[in-house]
Image (cartoon, rainbow, N blue to C red):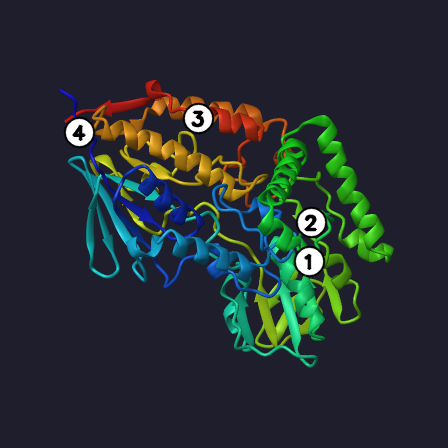
Amino acid sequence: MTQIKRNPAVVIIGAGMTGILMTIKLRKAGITDIVVLEKKDCVGGTWRENTYPGAACDVPAHMYTYSFEPNPNWSRFFARGPEIKQYFENVADKYDVKRDIRFNEAVTDAKYADGKWTVKTDKAQTYIADFIVCATGILHHPQCPDIPGLEDFTGAIFHTAQWNHDVEISTSTRVGVIGTGSTAAQAIPELINTGAKVSVFQRTPQWLMHLPDFEFSKTSRKLMSRYPIITKIHRNAGKFFLEHIFTKAVTGHFVQKHLLNFLCKTNLRLSIKDKILREKLRPNYQVGCKRVIINTTFYKGIQKPNAELITEGIDRITATGITTKDGKHHELDVLVLSTGFNAFNFMRPMNLIGRNNLHIDKAWQHKIKAYRSMLLPNYPNFFLMLGPNTPIGNFSVIAMSEVQADYVIKMIDKWRGHQFDEFEAKPQAIDEFNAYIKEGLKGTSWVGGCQSWYLDADGDPILWPYTWQRWVDEMKQPQMEHFNTRLF
């Protein structure tokens, strides 16, 4: 007798890019019992959170879309934050995703027992689920620097991910920016363009690569709307660059690695005329060790007369500014912290409790690791999207989520077909996967002698060290011998 396919109850945590995608994919697979829990009042994830001036994606716009939902109307080669957020809003509306979203409802606890997940929120709501898809994103917990006197500053102070748009910045404003990473490289030129005096406090210089950013004309957008093949060509060109140039460069392929070196070093030499400033901006680690910044505005901005690059190191923050280690005090009205995120939080501070009351903090107390970046022992029927060792350092996050979403659907479909009631990765499979990752990391740029958010407490990068196609191929079919399964 043929068994009827089951319809699982699925809770998705987060309504950003991955949460929207999972809702669409689950529905397409015929799964209808879906609840999406979103801590804020709208969709968009990182593009809702980051509203700093100049916020943009460093992946070509036509590649930064769902494969099934191209956008011929991008206004620029590298899309700006508001336009990206609007894209996700439009997709959510088109596919009626919002009917399954509970907005302003943050997950506080998720506990597995007796074959079910019990999920609790800060609205005192409880949901029972067969599966959890944790789509909480990668970089969403701002990290503030541990600098003496931070609380003493009496001017306006905020993190770039919590930009205070009520603070007026004009030609008479003295702005200090701590940090020179990807976000800072976008925000600093915008601050300089206001005419304010901008002091940039740099701890470690970054490698920047120049890729032209340009507007798409109305004519070209009309043509892309009329002839979708043109949009597809743009998308494939961006994919080719990331897959065959950038990804291979940072994962140790000889020709691409030297090409990336040449492009970044030439960009510095040609862009910065002043030799002293150029040397201040020259990193002492190999290209790709930190995330290479694709940017056309930072080098121009930092050379303007109202900009100052300070490399002496911060001694302390005072009520009126910053004192550097050379004893100089820099008077400031506004202090912007562009100091990154806690990249290893993942679903935390949520209390994730698996089998035998195992809390995620205890499970990860020695090492943050997961099988295929998604699956954890002792946490049955739980998927962590964009977990450790995804290719986040060298490819489009949307493309990664689509690959992972298809994997999730295949595993849930086995449950629907009564092949198992619960599954989890075997500890041995996780150990073997992490040994495989560690072996591949040896030849990558990420072990090039720098400190970056890519590195865990042991100094191991949390990235995928092989090619994009290899990752795609290895994610096509779940290897069931790597799982413990159980029928109740």
* Three-letter code for the amino acid on which mark 4 is drawn: Ile
Q: Quadrant of the N terminus?
A: top left
| Numbered disc 2: secondary structure | loop
Question: Residue 342 placed where, x, y %?
Answer: 47, 51
Residue 206's disc number: 2
Closer to viewer: mark 2 or mark 1 = 1
Residue placed most toward the observer, 317 or 165: 165
* Three-letter code for the amino acid on which mark 1 is drawn: Ser
Closer to viewer: mark 3 or mark 4 = 4
- Report, in whole angstroms, how far the alpha carbon at label 3 lies from the one at label 4: 25 Å
Determine if residue 375 is in view. no
Of the two numbered discs 2 and 1 on the same chain, state the one appearing first in sequence.
2
| Numbered disc 4: secondary structure | loop
Using the image, determine if residue 89 lies above or below residue 151.
above
Residue at 56% x, 25% y: name it. Answer: 440
Closer to viewer: mark 4 or mark 2 = 4
Q: Quadrant of the C terminus?
A: top left
Residue 476's disc number: 3
Of the two numbered discs 4 and 2 on the same chain, state the one appearing first in sequence.
4
Q: On the picture, is 138 further left or further right than 255?
A: left
* Three-letter code for the amino acid on which mark 2 is drawn: Gln
Q: Are marks 3 and 2 in contact (CB under 8 Å)?
A: no
Of the two numbered discs 4 and 1 on the same chain, state the one appearing first in sequence.
4
* Three-letter code for the amino acid on which mark 3 is drawn: Lys
Closer to viewer: mark 3 or mark 1 = 1
Q: Which residue is mark 1?
A: 217
Q: Which residue is mark 4?
A: 4
| Numbered disc 3: secondary structure | loop
Residue at 25% x, 29% y: name it. Answer: 415
Question: Residue 14 placed where, x, y %?
Answer: 37, 51
| Numbered disc 1: secondary structure | loop
